[in-house]
Structure formats: structure tokens, C-alpha cells
Amino acid sequence: MARQDNREREERDSEFVDKLVHINRVAKVVKGGRRFGFAALVVVGDQKGRVGFGHGKAREVPEAIRKATEAAKRTMVRVPLREGRTLHHDVEGRHGAGKVILRAAPAGTGIIAGGPMRAVFETLGVQDVVAKSLGSSNPYNMVRATFDALIKEDSPRSVAARRGLKVSVLQSRRRDNEDAVPAAAEA
């Protein structure tokens, strides 16, 4: 019975991809000198639209990574993706002094993003995105700002449901507005 539970847990865990974003050595000063520990920042995702991040601290690096991975799996969020490869719309996010701008991109663009943001997009399953980090380059703040932006991401289906419209009506209005804008710009 216990072996079957372990196998099921391993199968569930194997669907997730985890990336170590940052590891930091921290020191606690005690009477005899310094005690060193390690803090790890890990991003976990299923590459199908779910992603989470976690922070773990321990005396040894592997234990810190394990704790961070467990925390990341507990805090996973679902992000709506267009065609399973990019974002639906441009969005900004911020946390503390960290500010990020995420932009949807056409197919073939790839992931154009800096270190911590790149790890989030790779584990999320996004293939085409352009991202810019403004402000803090602290990996913790960058990851939290990226998550802030991803949480704001909306799909046309959820917007249509909120407004009580059909998705096709919503998208036809968008196309009508796009056609009208260039004509107004030419005049």
C-alpha cells in the first residue's frame, strides 16, 4: 500500500519541471563564530500553464532546494495562455522596487527575458514572449513581480463571461476597433 502511494506521488511530481533560480549563503553570527546556511529560490511548473515559486532555507544546499521545491508546489497558479505558447495581452507587474513588463509575441520569437523571468516562462510552458525588467534586479523581487503580472493575465473567455458576452462577439468587436484605428490615424 505504501509503495503504491509513493509511486503515485512520484508520478505526480514527475509532471513538474523545477528550476533553481538563485542560491544565497547566509550567515548567523553566534558566540563561537559564524554559522552558515543556504537560502534557495526555486520555480516549479508543469509547462502547460501552471507555475509556482518557493523559498527554502537550510544548513545544507540540497535540503534548502527540497524545501523551496515543496513550497513552490504549494503556491502554484494557473495562467491562461494563447494557443499554449504565448500570453493573451501585454501586462505589467511589480513587487517592491521590482517592475516587469511582459508582452505577447508572434510565433518563432522565443523567450526574450532575463535570468529569473526566463526560468518562470520556461517552467510555465510559454514559448514566445518578450519581457523587460525595470528597477530591482534582485531575483526574489523579479520573480514576485513576474507572478504579479501573470496573475493579472486574463483570457478572452473569462472577460466574456464577466461581461456576459460570447467570446466571438468580444473578438469581433476587437477586430472592428483594430480596423477603425488605422483609418483614423491616416486622416
Image (cartoon, helix red, strand yellow):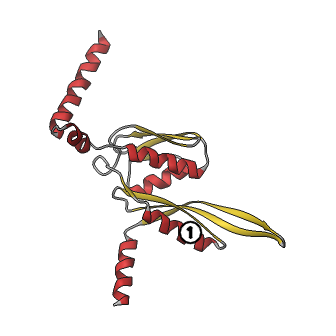
Query: Could you tell whether 56 is left or right of 181 in the image?
Result: right
Residue occupied by mark 1: 65
Residue in the picture at 54% in, 52% down: 116
Q: Which quadrant is home to the C terminus?
A: top left
Task: Tell me where residue 140 appears, x and y as whole percent.
Answer: 57, 52
Query: Could you tell whether 20 is left or right of 182 in the image?
Result: right
Counting labels gives 1
Query: Could you tell whether 8 is left or right of 68 in the image?
Result: left
Residue situated furthest top in the rendering: 187
Residue in the picture at 59% in, 74% down: 63
Residue in the picture at 66% in, 72% down: 59
Residue situated furthest front in the rendering: 31
Task: Tell me where residue 46 appears, x and y as whole percent.
Answer: 37, 62
Task: Tell me where residue 33 appears, x and y as whole percent.
Answer: 83, 70
SS under mark 1: helix
Query: On the image, which quarter does residue 17 sit in?
Result: bottom left
For label 1, the crowd category at 10 Å Cα-Cα, with few meaning under 14, some 14 to 19 and many 20 or more, is: many
Name above or below for residue 124 compared with residue 149: below
Residue type beneath disc 1:
Ile
Task: Tell me where residue 4 appears, x and y as whole percent.
Answer: 33, 86
Query: On the image, which quarter does residue 28 sit in?
Result: bottom right
Residue in the picture at 43% in, 60% down: 75
Q: Nearer the viewer, residue 117 or 99?
A: 99
Q: Which quadrant is home to the N terminus?
A: bottom left
Name above or below for residue 135 compared with residue 123: above
